[in-house]
Amino acid sequence: MITAIVFVKAETARIPEVAEAIAALEGVSEVYSVTGQIDLIALVRVRRHEDIAVVVSDQLNKVSGVVDTETHIAYRAYSRHDLESAFSLGLD
């Protein structure tokens, strides 16, 4: 599974509608409304790198109200769950 993190700038008055439209796209697993320089963060999870172009370039960027995007492709994931599993001795 390939994960891309997409920073989205949207028309301010349309942020909720833009978020819902992005969340409805195939391949988008989550959309967060955030503070700061960007308005939304979308997590895209797909099987192939080529699918990122389909989701982001062909669909997400064309959602009405999207002003700009910046895409980051994750190459390694770290989470509390993964770290606990790695250091677990198998004792419950």
Image (cartoon, helix red, strand yellow):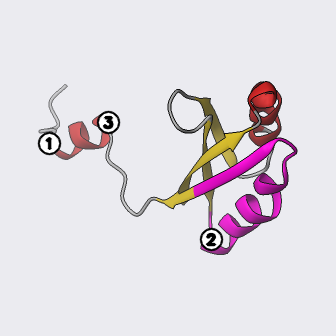
- Cα distance between the residues tagged 1 and 2: 30 Å
Label 1 neighbour load within 10 Å: few <14, some 14-19, many 20+: few
- Cα distance between the residues tagged 3 and 2: 25 Å
Q: Secondary structure at mark 1?
A: loop
Whether the magenta-drawn stretch holds residue 64 is answered as yes
| Disc 3 to disc 2: CB gap under 8 Å | no
The mark lying in front, picked from 3 and 2, is 2
| N-term mark: 1 or 3 | 3
Give the vertical position of 22 relative to 73 (above or below): above
Whether the magenta-drawn stretch holds residue 90 is answered as no
Say whether residue 72 is left or right of residue 21.
left
The mark lying in front, picked from 1 and 2, is 2
Q: Amino acid at mark 1?
A: Phe
Point out which mark residue 87 bears.
1
Q: Amino acid at mark 2?
A: Arg
From the top left corner, tell me how far across and down residue 13 is, in percent.
80, 25
Label 3 neighbour load within 10 Å: few <14, some 14-19, many 20+: few
Point out which mark residue 81 bears.
3
Q: Amino acid at mark 3?
A: His
Identify which residue is drawn at 84% across, 55% down.
Answer: 62
Q: Secondary structure at mark 3?
A: helix
Identify which residue is drawn at 77% across, 42% down.
Answer: 22
| N-term mark: 3 or 2 | 2
Q: Magenta stretch? A: 47-70
| Name of the residue lying farthest toward the right | 64
Point out which mark residue 48 bears.
2
Q: Secondary structure at mark 2?
A: loop
From the top left corner, tell me how far across and down residue 81 is, in percent.
32, 36
Give the vertical position of 38 relative to 68 (above or below): above
| N-term mark: 1 or 2 | 2
- Cα distance between the residues tagged 1 and 3: 10 Å
Residue 52 quadrant: bottom right
